[in-house]
Amino acid sequence: MPKQIKKYNDVKVYSKLTRNSVGEEYAKTLEQMYTDVVLVPMFNDQDTMIEQWGIEFFHKESQGEIAWTIITCLMAFINNTGHMLSHVIENEELGFYALVQEKLCLGQEATIWKDVLGVATIVTDEDYDESE
């Protein structure tokens, strides 16, 4: 009988999230990596190397894909450990996605909505007015 493959992307629901100093240090490391990636100026396609992390990219699109990969790494870490990390993240965008994952892990709805300026917010059931 073949061994079942564990699905690491399934949302795990916890009764509460825990604080963990090792997890917090990992989140701060990802935050620094994310900040370094998104703050590299890209005016034209050019070879860009962030030596501290060994990250290299050429296209602006690749920069965004690498940033999104860092976000998904943080979200997967929260999901698989049950650690609360949004409180230690200072970068607003990265902290937003950490908060989204924390809400999901607590069994709460966390629908993401972006306005015309690209500002993301979490929409909850309380945000919908049933009388309209």
Image: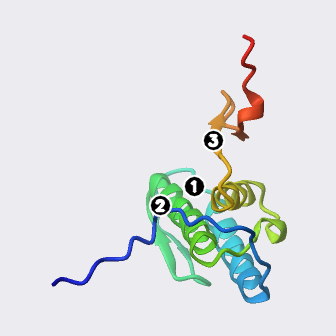
Q: Give coordinates of residue 67: x percent, y percent.
A: 56, 62
* CB-based contact (under 8 Å), mark 2 and mark 1: yes
- Front residue of this view, candidates 52 and 73: 73
Which of the 4 quarters of the picture holds residue 19?
bottom right
Is disc 2 placed on a helix, strand or loop?
A: loop
In space, the residues marked 2 and 3 are separated at their CA atoms by 32 Å
Mark 1: few/some/many CA within 10 Å (<14, 14-19, 20+) = some
Residue at which label 1 appears? 42
In space, the residues marked 2 and 1 are separated at their CA atoms by 7 Å
Q: Which amino acid type is marked by label 2?
A: Gln
Is disc 1 placed on a helix, strand or loop?
A: loop
- Judge depth for marks 3 and 1 and give the one in front: 3
**Outermost residue, left direction?**
1
In space, the residues marked 3 and 1 are separated at their CA atoms by 27 Å
- Judge depth for marks 2 and 3 and give the one in front: 3
Q: Quadrant of the N terminus?
A: bottom left
> Which comes before the other along the chain, label 3 or label 1?
1
Residue at which label 2 appears? 46
Q: Tell me the colour scheme of the image.
A: rainbow
Residue at which label 3 appears? 112
Mark 3: few/some/many CA within 10 Å (<14, 14-19, 20+) = few
Q: Give coordinates of residue 51: x percent, y percent.
A: 58, 83
Residue drawn at the location 63% of the way across and 56% of the way down = 104
Q: Give coordinates of residue 92: x percent, y percent.
A: 78, 55
In the image: residue 4, left or right of residue 83:
left
